[in-house]
Amino acid sequence: MGNSNFKDGSSLEDFGIEYAPAIESTSLVNIKDKYGLFIDGNFVDSSSGKSFKTLDPSTEKPLSVVTEASSDDVDRAVRSAGVSYEKYWKKMPGADRARYLFRIARHLQERAREFAVLETLDGGKPIKESRDVDLPLAAAHFFYHAGWADKLEYAFPQRKLEPHGVIGQIIPWNFPLLMAAWKLAPALACGNTVVLKPAETTPLTALLLAEVIRDVDLPPGVVNIVTGAGETGSAIVEHPEVDKLAFTGSTEVGKLIHRSAVKRNLPLTLELGGKAPHIIFEDAALDQAIEGVINGIFFNQGHVCCAGSRLLVQESIADYFIDRLQKRIELLRVGNPLDKNTDIGAINSLAQLERIDQLVKAGIDEGAEVFKPSCSLPENGYWYPPTVLTGVQQSHRVAREEIFGPVLVVQTFRTPEEALEKANNTPYGLSAGIWTEKGSLIHWMAERLRAGVIWANTFNKFDPTSPFGGYKESGFGREGGMQGLTAYLKNSGGHS
Amino acid sequence: MPTSTITFRETVSSIKVIPVDEVSLEARAASLATRSIKTTSKRAALHLAIRCMDLTTLEGADTPEKVASLCQKAKRPDPSNHGVPSVAAVCIYPEMVHHAVEATEGSNVKVASVAGAFPSGLSTIEARTADIADAVKRGADEIDIVLNRSAFLAGDEQRAFEEIVASKDACGKAHLKVILEVGELGSYDKIRQASVLAMAAGADFIKTSTGKIPQASSLPRVLCMAEAVRDFAQQTNISVGIKAAGGIRTAKQAWHYLVVIGETLGTEWLSPEMFRIGASSLLNDVLLQLNRLDSGSYSGPDYVTVD
Amino acid sequence: MTGKIPIAKTYKLFIDGAFPRSESGRTFSVNNPEGELIANVSQASRKDFREAVRAARAAQLSWASRTAYNRGQILYRVAEMLESRKIEFVELLKSIGVNSRSATREVEDSIQRWVWYAGWSDKYSQVLGSVNPVSGPYFNFTVPEPTGVVGIIAPTEPSMLGLISRLVPAIVSGNTVVVVSEGQSSLTSVTIGEVLATSDVPAGVVNILTGDQKDLLPWMVGHLDLNAVDISGISPETDLTLLEETASNVKRVVSRQVNEESLELISDFLEMKTVWHPIGR
């Protein structure tokens, strides 16, 4: 697994120096045998008695049993949220809502390592990411929005602001806790109550967050967390007393929700898929651009909607850049997600692994050349090596469809116009990356790229103050920043 | 002026200098510093750090006795443990060279001398090359000179280049290390440019700092230089060494440098021939860590020698 | 009658700056409240709709890339032209049954509204955008950008103010539009098109189709090259399941019963773009 190979085929290990398998202790995580649904401030059983297993994708070993919420359970949760909205939350001064959010943020900070380890166990992402990215950002989102709760009228002067009421929120498995924070913090700050459904493969950190919510004495029913798969999600989407829906996930499911909501004129925000162009000009700071490309596609195993999955490199430097990139990929450490030295963890589920594999095979069938490093993969669990497909044409499936895995497709361009044309030639529009040392070119490109987030000379950076969200089929509405509040306030403008 | 056939126009201008982004470079260096090392590998790493060390004293108050004492420590860092290797070199002023040559005789420890109006480099090139030639004549194996930052920053890269060429000539067989004094260059772009310039002019090593200004070596600066070395090797087939100097005081820092060099340049650079750490107090921290590995308990400063 | 026999105006479609008849050759009649024929109006087909979207898409980038100041100037000039044709619009509204006082007020309000939105061209970005204090060495800012091509179902009532209230907030930021206008309101819509045709608004920025919204709505919601639709003007009898097709390309769907000047109507057709760049040497 430790595969620090150099160009001469040797490695630090050969030299007698090995990186330690620095395994994060799991002792501070207490995983229960079974988890109930978090409704009206309590953990409760399902009316149907159904449940499902959640497992560690790096070992395929079951971690716990989680309750599957039936439509009756969802109904209970929505009613609880509705009652709580009228009884507590709507009347509560913003300053008091702020205090609850501050409390949640502090608890997240205090229990950060526990959350990080649980996130890594349940989802397969490297501990260094859950520890250094997911957790600090999740806490920061609660802090940031806490401050807004009593200042909303400064963000939108001269508007008749109003919360929507009960918000139905459905989140994906790639950043389970962080997406919960992105959804809950602004909704609560703006005075809404919530029914949240985490993804069926990664429910545990949301359920631990439910404990935090209970520990901070948030009034019962303000946040309800129901676990389950598609059917549970549908029950939320279709529930007549949900006043607004917010969804993060695949474009495919997003469109189904869009269909359902639009005919009822139900407010909706969607954060969907992407196929982000990552554009490298010949004058770029190439060593840093390599790091940016690596981070852009291999961060969180490429399970990132804004991943820089389409590398567009200027033809004049393509050979050099791809050679450098492949050497750099050889240094990536794939393996135990709990190892602090691990760069790439496990694929989140068997279904996702199969999808990645199928798309890469399709790419090879269409004529792409494949590069995979010489690393070995663990025998158990779901793994996919970091992969680069070269010789990819704009018409290839792998250049158009979201792979959502550690797979980079490489294309070249000659001029800024060509880069732009290829970059924008996609139904998606979530993010894009540009690397050049020429300031005016950055602005020229940034202005013309049809994407909601543009990273220039950096990639995959997130912040609660920075609005995030897509153009075109990548969805609508923003999360984060002042603009993100519009999703949870009537009459504030924006898509809500 | 230089008898060398290398000309500025043919070399520097033909070598592509890639720009550097500060924020991302520093983030990469910081992420390399989070790698943890296996306990069983720690001894090898600590020994490597010692073997790559240039034990340094560059004080106006240096005396023959001080230098003799330093050389003793260089040859046998831990008198109680013969398993601990000697350091790569001692680094001293030219006036001290013959004392050091005498004190290291019969050992593997090389004698490195700063020369050429160290640390500013601001005397005539004739005076500087004479200084270099004198140090070599006294027996120095390695010469550490400074880049003419005055010329480099004023835009006279050709002069800076040609002075290095001349210095290299004056070195004869001695190895030439060129100190860029990275803390004075103002940006990573300039560090990378200076690295390329010095390598093209014939430096055997490029070195971060004199140790005489507060801004000295840092992980991202060495990473920046290592990336220049890597590209230079690829473009010219010439492998140039790197010396990190100034502010490196702990075994952990030394380990971070080894990781940066190893991950950027490969294992062939993890040897005293290609990598050096210039330091004075670092050695004792490395020895303390070795003691801890041997005894299993934490050691104290009284258990290593001050010189 | 003492004068010559009046020449009646032919109400045609407004696509890409020109006034074609419907490719289908069909028309529908608009009568006054007394039941007398005012005009035969071209009835747009799905192919006309397709052409209109094509024209709007072709015009969008260059319209959006004009300076905000320039878009403002062009739109102010339209207001001036409306002002000079005030009497014509009042008469037109009267002909479809609006009483004289209301017609005068509607025309005046319409011009005022046009001016109000035109003035936002170089301001909404400052009000809705931001510089974001991210936690790290990055400069980070958010700017609003136009969504792209917008389909608008024009409100039938009030015909002039209703259309202008939807049209101008969409185009002021650089969107281009395809308007579907039906019934009596078609007359006002086409006449506004005539004003635009002689203005500096580039061809294709505004396209106006007259016809039956229930014929054209299915094509509008399903068209993959439309980025957004404003359905605020749909008739109450519309089967809303029709709207499901807006999901086919994740269209922004706006349905907002706002009848006053509103910044929100501008933001309805904006996308927020956030740009990051490191701060370093």
Image (cartoon, coloured by chain):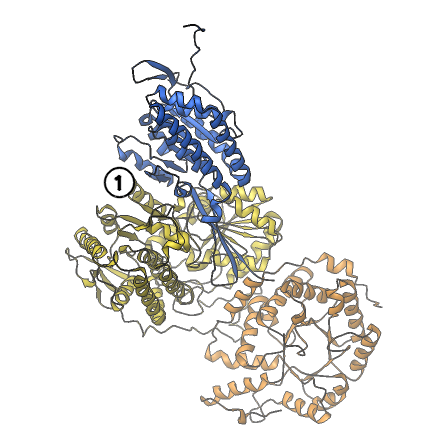
Residue A113, placed above or below residue C124: below
In which image quadrant can residue C164 be found? Answer: top left
* Residue C44 visible to the viewer: no
Q: Is residue C279 above or below residue C209?
A: below
In the image, taking residue B183 as reference, residue C135 lies left or right, namely left
Chain letter of the residue carrying label 1: A
Secondary structure of the residue carrying tag 1 is: loop
Q: Is residue A112 left or right of residue A43?
A: right
- Residue extending farthest to the front is C101
| Residue at x 64% of width, y 58% of height | B18
Q: Position of residue B107 (x, y in %)?
A: 68, 87
Residue shown at the point (70%, 94%) measured from the top left: B65
Specify the quadrant that holds the N terminus of chain A.
bottom left
User: Which residue, given by chain and number where applicable, does mark 1 sit on?
Assistant: A264
**Residue B199 or residue A193, whichever sits in front:** A193
Report which colour depicts chain B: orange
Q: Would you identify the image quadrant in which residue C266 lies?
A: top left
Please, what is the three-letter code of the amino acid marked with disc 1?
Arg
Give me the chain that's blue. Answer: C
Residue B215 seen anywhere in this rendered image of the structure: yes
Q: Position of residue B250 (x, y in %)?
A: 55, 81
Which x, y percent locates residue A45? 17, 60
Q: Residues within 10 Å of mark 1 (few under 14, many from 20)?
A: some
Number of marks drawn? 1
Residue A403 screen position, x and y as percent: 41, 50
**Which residue is at the front of the view, B38 or A200?**
A200
User: Chain A is shown in which shade?
Assistant: yellow
Above-or-below relation of A197 to C261: below
Camera-side residue of C44 and B171? C44
